[in-house]
């Protein structure tokens, strides 16, 4: 059977499941959960994996799942992934009233897409014509939120990393994967379009910081001279960061955006415990690390100015996204077949970050953006307005790309793998973050 015939069969199979795929996305949209707590989503994915007769494992990185679809040969392993977690946006009309969790970033669509790929490949029977395997991941905790909670999980030994893909890398769950793909919903893009990234950098990377200023409490009205004001130290530290902004190169796209999460205890007590969280984002690892040193220097200077102490807890963030050129071209060609040339556009690099960047430093991967969504990302007006575009069409495009990679002895996929030059090995990747945390 020709490759074109296989693609036609898988697309027809996905179309027959369109209502079910959309129902998955809608269920998750109405039942948002935060990272490492995606129990409803995980149960739904497990139900679908069982119904498809897939061999799978669950409880990976607490809530993740992994299934494998086997081809007639296993010459190559391609991962198709979907994230399950939400962000916090209390004002979103579909937010969880207790947690504020909201799918105002589109991860509900990713899970629906991933399951759509699974349904199409199983129902069509095309795996019997392909010479490689497909690994299906339902992934936890991409959004870098609730840092205190995740740090607690780490201290308890339940996780090593705050990001789900990072954790699965450390657990060895990507050791049997050769390349990976996923799609992400775009914001303010209601039209039927795929935004294809230019090869190379697709997003910023970042490292996180949890900062604690320690001062000395005293009566704020009666004896402030007996205290050491940790809030003043923090404010000076933040002003020091601002004073460094002109030293950041435009090409490095450095972003530092701290928030004060605790400013003291009572208004009539000199603040002795002040907390800050921040990211340091940038286009490359070197740029991030350079900016990080400047940020730390500024934070330390704030403490020194008033005689306070500062404790900076470095948190492994995400690496910049590196979209593989050859995989990107395959995906774009399939999108053009589905949507016409007018439905394929070049996407701008993301100012945000994703742990898909970590994957793409180790193996070939792609992370294109999908239309069908109105409203701003992470905001109250974010809505799916074209479910077919948001859920179903990306599933077809990914399934078609899987066929390209695994057809004819998986020749094209194996060629991409052989020509790929990883930025680092898994071991080097883990050692890099270990050095950041422990200074080893």
Image (cartoon, rainbow, N blue to C red):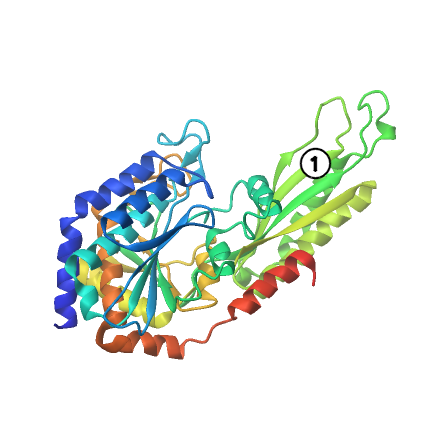
Indicate the quadrant where residue 93 lies: top left
Residue in view at x 13 percent, y 73 percent? 2
Question: Can you give x and y, in whole percent of width and height, for residue 16 in the image?
Answer: 13, 50
173 is higher (above) or lower (below) than 373? below
Question: Can you give x and y, in whole percent of width and height, for residue 75 in the image?
Answer: 31, 74
Left or right of residue 235: residue 179: left
Residue in view at x 46 percent, y 31 percent? 99
**Label 1: few (<14), some (14–19) or many (≥20) C-alpha neighbours in 10 Å:** many
Question: Can you give x and y, in whole percent of width and height, for residue 165 in the image?
Answer: 46, 55
Disc 1: which residue: 274
Q: On the rendered image, what quadrant is the N terminus found in?
A: bottom left
Indicate the quadrant where residue 309 lies: top right
Residue in view at x 53 percent, y 40 percent? 146
- Does residue 308 appear anywhere in the picture? yes
Left or right of residue 53: residue 42: right
Q: On the rendered image, what quadrant is the C terminus found in?
A: bottom right
Question: Can you give x and y, in whole percent of width and height, for residue 338 in the image?
Answer: 18, 59
Left or right of residue 201: residue 110: left
Foreground pick, 226 / 118? 118
374 is higher (above) or lower (below) than 7? above
Left or right of residue 194: residue 317: right
- Label 1: state its secondary structure: strand
Foreground pick, 355 / 279? 355
């Amino acid at each position: 059977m020709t490759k074109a015939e296989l693609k036609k069969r898988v697309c027809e199979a996905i179309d027959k499941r369109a209502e079910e795929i959309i129902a998955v996305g809608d269920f998750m949209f109405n039942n948002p959960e935060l990272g490492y707590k995606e129990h409803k989503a995980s149960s739904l994915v497990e139900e679908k994996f069982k119904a498809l007769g897939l061999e799978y494992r669950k409880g990976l990185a607490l809530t993740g799942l992994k299934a494998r679809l086997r081809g007639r040969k296993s010459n190559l392993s391609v991962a198709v992934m979907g994230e399950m977690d939400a962000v916090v946006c209390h004002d979103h009309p579909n937010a969880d009233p207790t947690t504020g969790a909201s799918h105002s970033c589109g991860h509900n669509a990713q899970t629906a897409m991933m399951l759509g790929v699974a349904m199409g490949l199983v129902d069509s029977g095309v795996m019997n014509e392909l010479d490689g395997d497909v690994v299906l991941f339902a992934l936890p905790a991409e959004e870098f939120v609730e840092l205190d909670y995740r740090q607690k999980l780490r201290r308890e030994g339940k996780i090593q990393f705050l990001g789900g893909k990072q954790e699965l890398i450390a657990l060895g769950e990507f050791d049997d994967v050769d390349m990976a793909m996923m799609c992400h919903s775009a914001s303010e893009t209601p039209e039927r379009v795929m935004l294809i990234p230019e090869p190379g950098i697709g997003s910023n990377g970042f490292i996180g910081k949890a900062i604690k200023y320690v001062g000395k409490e005293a009566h704020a009205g009666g004896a402030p001279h007996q205290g050491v004001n940790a809030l003043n130290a923090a404010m000076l530290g933040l002003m020091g960061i601002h004073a460094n902004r002109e030293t950041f190169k435009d090409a490095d796209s450095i972003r530092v955006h701290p928030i004060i999460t605790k400013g003291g205890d009572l208004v009539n007590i000199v603040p002795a415990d002040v907390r800050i969280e921040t990211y340091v984002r940038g286009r490359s690892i070197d740029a991030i690390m350079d900016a990080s040193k400047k940020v730390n220097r500024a934070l330390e200077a704030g403490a020194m100015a008033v005689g306070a102490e500062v404790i900076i807890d470095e948190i492994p963030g995400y690496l910049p996204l590196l979209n593989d050129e050859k995989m990107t071209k395959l995906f774009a060609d399939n999108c053009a077949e589905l949507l016409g040339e007018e439905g394929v556009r070049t996407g701008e690099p993301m100012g945000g970050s994703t742990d898909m960047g970590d994957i793409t430093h180790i193996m070939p991967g792609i992370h294109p953006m999908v239309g069908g969504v109105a409203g701003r990302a992470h905001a109250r007006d974010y809505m799916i307005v074209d479910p077919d575009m948001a859920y179903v069409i990306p599933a077809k495009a990914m399934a078609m790309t899987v066929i390209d990679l695994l057809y004819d002895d998986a020749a094209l996929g194996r060629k991409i793998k052989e020509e790929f030059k990883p930025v680092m090995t898994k071991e080097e990747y883990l050692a890099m973050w270990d050095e950041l945390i422990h200074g080893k």
